[in-house]
Image (cartoon, rainbow, N blue to C red):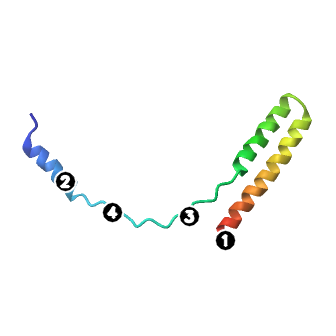
Amino acid sequence: MKNPEKVDKLTDEANSAKISWHEALPEKIPEPTYWPAMLAFGIVLIFWGLVSTWLISLAGVIITGFSLAGWIGAMIDERD
């Protein structure tokens, strides 16, 4: 059986503990975008091209470049 004095002491300590809650800042959820998926696809093509042919790697580099530019551009536009 639990000691009632000990249980009371624990609940008093828990009740007396001050938890400071801060007001949440308003969050702006970013717009959905396909850029991360395209970036991942470009990276896959780069590595796939390493084991097959350089043309696939070239396509991967191009897709990766466009994806990075598009994603960074979307982030900059979102910030404004």
How far apart marks 2 and 3 lie (CA) works out to: 38 Å
Q: How many marks?
A: 4
Residue 31 vs 38, above or below: the answer is below
Q: Mark 4 points at which residue?
A: 20
Q: In this view, does 77 lie to the left or right of 64?
A: left
Amino acid beneath label 4: Ser
Amino acid beneath label 3: Lys
Residue at 76% in and 53% down: 68
Label 4 packing within 10 angstroms: few (<14), some (14-19), many (20+): few
How far apart marks 2 and 4 lie (CA) works out to: 16 Å
How far apart marks 4 and 1 lie (CA) works out to: 32 Å
Q: What element carries label 3?
A: loop
- Select label 2 or label 1 by which is in front: 1
Amino acid beneath label 1: Asp
Label 2 packing within 10 angstroms: few (<14), some (14-19), many (20+): few
Q: Name the residue under label 2.
A: 13
How far apart marks 3 and 4 lie (CA) works out to: 24 Å
